[in-house]
């Protein structure tokens, strides 16, 4: 028992003999005074657990701190535009604190300075800290026009080359209708002929022919009844409607692609911001590592690792910026913008993505609404309406070909001409008839046999009808599959928003704890990097989770044929009323 007491007493004497008490007289400006607890905490982590630092702190207004230089203080920390060197004075000045990184720089420099002053006995050292913060003057606020989804919609409709080509296709189909109608309109031709024959034949024709004749006339052709012509007009009209639906769907695809590109740009911008944040963390840790090496409390391996991480993050940043520029260039080409522009940011609370002033997910997760969407697409989706009109076309062709076996074609033809002059041999021969001539023909034709062409056309129509119906079901199933997948993805994206916020919250706490332990030497750089990477990943997920949700939402709108709900107030209002009507149904 006595032995244990003696050992305990020796240990206590050993600890007391190596523990030290330091007195520190600080002058801090009002801004740095806010960080005094962090300065104390980090300073204590670099000293022995039994060491004690007694602080005497004076606070000064930022503009009046230089007055304190006349007093006999130990360390001064305050804001100034330049370095202040004064005999027997220990002065830390900084130009500005604009971000958390500037805060960390001031705090860490103060800690290392205190460590050097108290333990290394380094005196009369002046330091000036220049902020690395570059104010991000958002050009979009001052110089660039900000575009939102509605602006993109208007520009793509007015400028996009593919949409203009699609509109020209519609003009072509209208011309085809006029062509088919022209077959049922009268065809009137004026003509004049100069007829020349040899003199002998005119001489011996007994006045029937003259050697030279000049005549003028007119010819009228009119279809009175033709089932093919009538059916062809109907077919061309149906094809025009089918083309309209096809063009509308193609235009919607371009709009959908433009909207996706828009949101991907926002996503990449957030990604670049997170990478820049990570880069600033690494730069801060690199500076801190250099300071630790300078005072002999860290190894160079940490420095090399931070240098490597900085190089890697720069590569990652360049690649992300390249992707961002590519997406911006693609959107610019879609809308044919001649000038640079910026984009309005969107989130869950943006009115554009709400329905009846609440989150769209509140409706789309409802089973009644899901069923409505699947039923709604049959009536409204342009790709399905296009196939429906093509089926109508083939039915008309089928009917036309079947009826052509027994329905006649009736046409009327009339011609009138007048001989204006005769010349040459036989021109003066007396004739019992005058120089005027006309004729009328009523033509009635009924096909009896066409070599099997009609039967072949009918069989072909039957096969084409079957294929079109199969195509309709294929597209319908594909649309339903896409809606299902995107609705499922939408629900998961919405859930991920909360999870990402929770993950980011705890990853940040974990990073701060590991960082504190790393500073005190109780954690390795590997652990810090793992914690930092985990924090950055969670920060990225939290940053882009809302954009992922919006991407899934516009995909649901597109595949259900409602992409314009985002940009057309009338269509949005109609869609909202339909949703409310579905929910009110019993």
Image: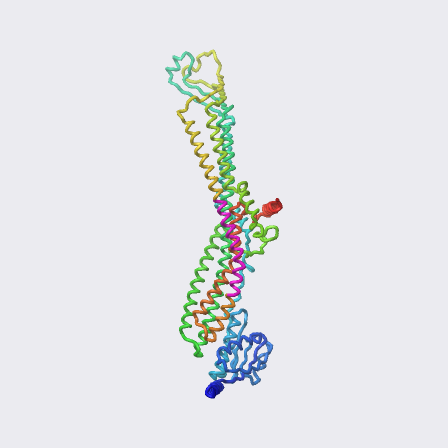
Q: Is residue 88 above or below residue 331?
A: below
Q: Quadrant of residue 300?
A: bottom left
Q: Is residue 400 above or below residue 498?
A: above
Q: Is residue 198 above or below residue 341?
A: above
Q: Residue at x 45, y 79 (%)?
A: 295
Please state the horizontal and vertical placement of residue 394, each as a whole percent of the image: 47, 33
Identify which residue, 557 or 176, lies in the foreground: 557
Q: What number of labels is visible?
A: 0
Q: Is residue 126 left or right of residue 203?
A: right
Q: Is residue 412 left or right of residue 357?
A: left
Observer able to see residue 352? no
Q: Is residue 530 above or below residue 29?
A: above
Observer able to see residue 393? yes
Picture colour scheme: rainbow
Query: Residue placed farthest to the front in the image?
Result: 1
Q: Quadrant of the C terminus?
A: top right
Please state the horizontal and vertical placement of residue 270, each as a whole percent of the image: 50, 60
Q: Quadrant of residue 209?
A: top left
**484 inside magenta stretch:** yes
- Which residues are the magenta region? 478-506
Please state the horizontal and vertical placement of residue 123, each as a whole percent of the image: 49, 84
Identify which residue, 269 or 62, lies in the foreground: 269
Main SS, magenta residues: helix
Please state the horizontal and vertical placement of residue 528, each as a whole percent of the image: 46, 69
Identify which residue, 322 or 203, lies in the foreground: 322
**318 inside magenta stretch:** no
């Amino acid at each position: 028992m006595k032995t244990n007491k003696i050992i305990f007493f020796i240990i206590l004497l050993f600890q007391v003999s190596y523990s030290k008490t330091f007195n520190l007289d600080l002058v801090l400006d009002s801004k740095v005074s806010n960080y005094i607890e962090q300065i104390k905490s980090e300073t204590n982590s670099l000293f022995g657990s039994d060491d004690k630092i007694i602080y005497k702190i004076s606070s000064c207004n930022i503009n009046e701190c230089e007055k304190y230089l006349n007093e006999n203080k130990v360390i001064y920390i305050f804001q100034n535009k330049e370095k202040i060197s004064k005999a027997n004075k220990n002065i830390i000045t900084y130009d500005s604190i604009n971000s958390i990184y500037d805060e960390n720089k001031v705090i860490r420099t103060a800690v290392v300075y205190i460590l050097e002053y108290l333990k290394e006995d380094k005196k009369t050292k002046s330091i000036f800290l220049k902020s690395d913060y570059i104010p991000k003057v958002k050009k979009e606020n001052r110089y660039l026009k900000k575009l939102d989804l509605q602006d993109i919609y208007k520009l793509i409709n007015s400028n996009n080359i593919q949409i203009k080509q699609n509109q020209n296709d519609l003009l072509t189909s209208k011309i085809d209708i006029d062509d088919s109608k022209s077959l049922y309109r009268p065809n009137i031709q004026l003509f004049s002929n100069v007829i020349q024959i040899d003199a002998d034949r005119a001489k011996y024709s007994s006045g029937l022919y003259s050697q030279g004749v000049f005549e003028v006339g007119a010819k009228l052709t009119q279809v009175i009844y033709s089932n093919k012509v009538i059916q062809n007009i109907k077919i061309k009209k149906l094809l025009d409607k089918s083309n309209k639906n096809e063009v509308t769907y193609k235009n919607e695809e371009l709009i959908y692609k433009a909207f996706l590109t828009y949101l991907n740009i926002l996503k990449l911008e957030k990604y670049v911001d997170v990478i820049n944040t990570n880069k600033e963390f690494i730069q801060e840790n690199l500076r801190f590592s250099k300071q630790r090496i300078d005072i002999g409390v860290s190894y160079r391996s940490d420095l090399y690792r931070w240098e490597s991480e900085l190089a890697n993050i720069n590569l990652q940043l360049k690649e992300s910026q390249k992707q961002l520029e590519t997406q911006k260039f693609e959107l610019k080409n879609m809308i044919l913008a001649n000038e640079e522009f910026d984009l309005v940011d969107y989130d869950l609370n943006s009115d554009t993505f709400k329905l009846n002033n609440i989150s769209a997910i509140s409706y789309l997760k409802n089973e009644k609404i899901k069923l409505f969407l699947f039923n709604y697409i049959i009536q409204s989706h342009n790709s399905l309406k296009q196939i429906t009109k093509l089926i109508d076309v083939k039915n008309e062709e089928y009917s036309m070909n079947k009826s052509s076996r027994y329905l006649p074609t009736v046409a009327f033809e009339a011609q009138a001409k007048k001989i204006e002059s005769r010349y040459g041999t036989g021109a003066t021969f007396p004739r019992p008839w005058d120089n005027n001539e006309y004729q009328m023909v009523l033509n009635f034709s009924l096909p009896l046999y066409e070599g099997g062409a009609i039967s072949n056309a009918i069989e072909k129509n039957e096969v084409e009808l079957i294929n079109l119906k199969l195509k309709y079901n294929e597209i319908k199933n594909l649309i339903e599959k896409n809606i299902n997948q995107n609705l499922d993805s939408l629900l998961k994206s919405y859930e991920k928003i909360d999870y990402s916020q929770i993950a980011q919250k705890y990853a940040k706490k974990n990073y701060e704890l590991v960082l504190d332990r790393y500073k005190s030497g109780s954690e390795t750089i590997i652990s810090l990097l793992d914690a930092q990477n985990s924090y950055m990943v969670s920060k990225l997920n939290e940053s882009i989770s809302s954009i992922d949700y919006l991407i899934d939402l516009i995909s649901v709108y597109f595949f259900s044929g409602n992409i314009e709900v985002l940009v057309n107030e009338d269509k949005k209002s109609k869609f909202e009323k339909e949703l409310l009507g579905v929910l009110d149904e019993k």
